Amino acid sequence: MQGEGQAIGGQATESMTGKLLVATPALKDPNFDRTVVLLVAHEPGGALGVVLNRATEVPVADVLREWGDLARHPAVLFEGGPVQPDSAICLARMRQPVRRLKGFHQVSGAVGTLDLSVDPHRLRENVQSIRVFAGYAGWGTGQLEQEVEDGSWFVLEALPGDAFVERPDDLWPMVLRRQGGMMAAVAHFPPDVALN
């Protein structure tokens, strides 16, 4: 559950649900090169997130007709991650923070996951925008914590608009630059240089 601590190496850690995972240049997995992942769940059994900056060319309306007009520009499907690419996860930004709304599961503030089997017309007055992800990123027990410890990910605070930016290709450097200092310098790291 969100907010519950978990024991890692004998120490309790806070849930990272709602945080951004920003790939460091040291991350070797090409599935996550220069990605920004929003963690939608982080529990003792593992973690689940969606990659925010991998847009496809497929319009949401072509796949989920009734949801197309709620999709934020660019109104296309996103590659949410390498796990179950045939499944869909929908993120929604509500007009105001909502804790109880059928089909909505709060991740952080006004952002959460939305059940695509719910009638979108019933949600129209509450939903500011959605983004639909094909697949997701998943980690088993302790796997994400180990990757963070190994320097593969920066764990950063998310802003409500991060999942809905109009230029998703710019998200990785944008998130790093707003951190300031040395982390801002990482935003200028050449993409074709590998760290040993």
Image (tube, grey):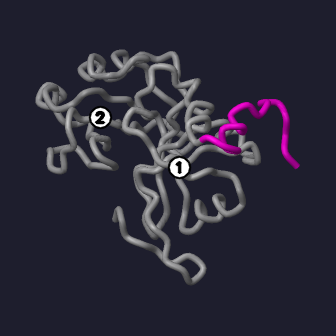
Q: Earlier in the sequence, mark 2 or mark 1?
A: 2
Q: Amino acid at mark 2?
A: Arg
- Residue 159 screen position, x and y as percent: 42, 39
Which mark lies nearer to you, 2 or 1? Answer: 1
Q: Residue at x 24, y 20 (%)?
A: 66
Q: Which residues are magenta?
A: 180-196
Q: Residue at x 52, y 25 (%)?
A: 168
Q: Quadrant of the N terminus?
A: bottom left
The vertical placement of 15 against 169, above or below, is below
- Residue 171 screen position, x and y as percent: 55, 30
Give SS at disc 1.
Answer: strand
The vertical placement of 66 against 185, above or below, is above
Q: Which mark is residue 93?
A: 2
- Left of 101 or right of it: where is 27? right
Q: Residue at x 60, y 63 (%)?
A: 143
Give SS at disc 2.
Answer: strand
The vertical placement of 67 against 193, above or below, is above
Q: Which mark is residue 168?
A: none
Residue pointed to by mark 1: 156
CA distance separating discs 2 and 1 = 19 Å
Query: Where is residue 81, by image quadrant?
Result: top right
- Residue 133 screen position, x and y as percent: 44, 33
Mark 2 crowdedness (10 Å alpha carbons): few <14, some 14-19, many ≥20: many
- As for residue 183 lying within the magenta part, the answer is yes
